[in-house]
């Protein structure tokens, strides 16, 4: 390969890296906003840590319904969720400390990372 090909490969790799970092940031911001709006006493959360986002096809509409009905300990009832998309969901795991306990939740987002579809 000539030097021009290496430059092109480097530029493409950098663009992919920046795009994935942007998606991670957007998913984290959506999850943080969801927690602030829907958790009981969100001000007690410290040490938030997010795993890398991932994609799943293994969450059915019926499983989403069950997760929505169950909610999670420490969250309000009657949460408003985003529409269930056709296709893949993006998931993001958040670990945090609340009242001295280390807890975690997994959030399922639409493909645009604009809303939480369900969580556990």
Image (cartoon, rainbow, N blue to C red):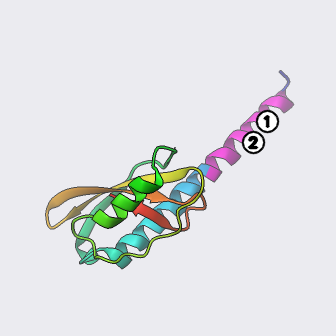
Q: Is residue 29 visible?
A: no
Which label sits on residue 7? 1
Q: Quadrant of residue 85?
A: bottom right
Q: Position of residue 56 (x, y in %)?
A: 50, 45
Q: Residue at x 21, y 65 (%)?
A: 73
- Percent across and percent down for residue 107 are 40, 58
Which residue ends up furthest to the front in the rendered image? 62
Q: Residue at x 36, y 65 (%)?
A: 68
Q: Which residue is mark 2?
A: 11
Is residue 14 shown left or right of residue 118? right
Q: Nearer the viewer, residue 91 or 28?
A: 91
Q: Is residue 59 visible?
A: yes
Q: Quadrant of residue 80?
A: bottom left
Rate crowding at label 1 as few (under 14), some (14 to 19) or many (20 or more) other CA atoms within 10 Å: few
* 76 relative to 27, above or below: below
Quarter placement of the C terminus: bottom left
Q: Position of residue 25 (x, y in %)?
A: 52, 60
């Amino acid at each position: 390969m000539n030097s021009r090909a290496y430059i092109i490969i480097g530029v493409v790799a950098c663009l992919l890296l920046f795009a994935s970092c942007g998606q991670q940031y957007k998913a984290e911001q959506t999850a943080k906003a969801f927690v602030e709006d829907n958790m009981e006493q969100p001000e007690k959360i410290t040490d938030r840590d997010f795993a890398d986002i991932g994609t799943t096809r293994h969450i059915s509409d019926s499983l989403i319904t069950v997760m929505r009905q169950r909610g999670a300990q420490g969250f309000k009832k009657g949460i408003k969720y985003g529409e269930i998309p056709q296709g893949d969901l993006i998931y993001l795991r958040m670990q945090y400390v609340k009242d001295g306990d280390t807890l975690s939740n997994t959030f399922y987002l639409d493909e645009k990372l604009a809303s939480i579809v369900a969580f556990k």
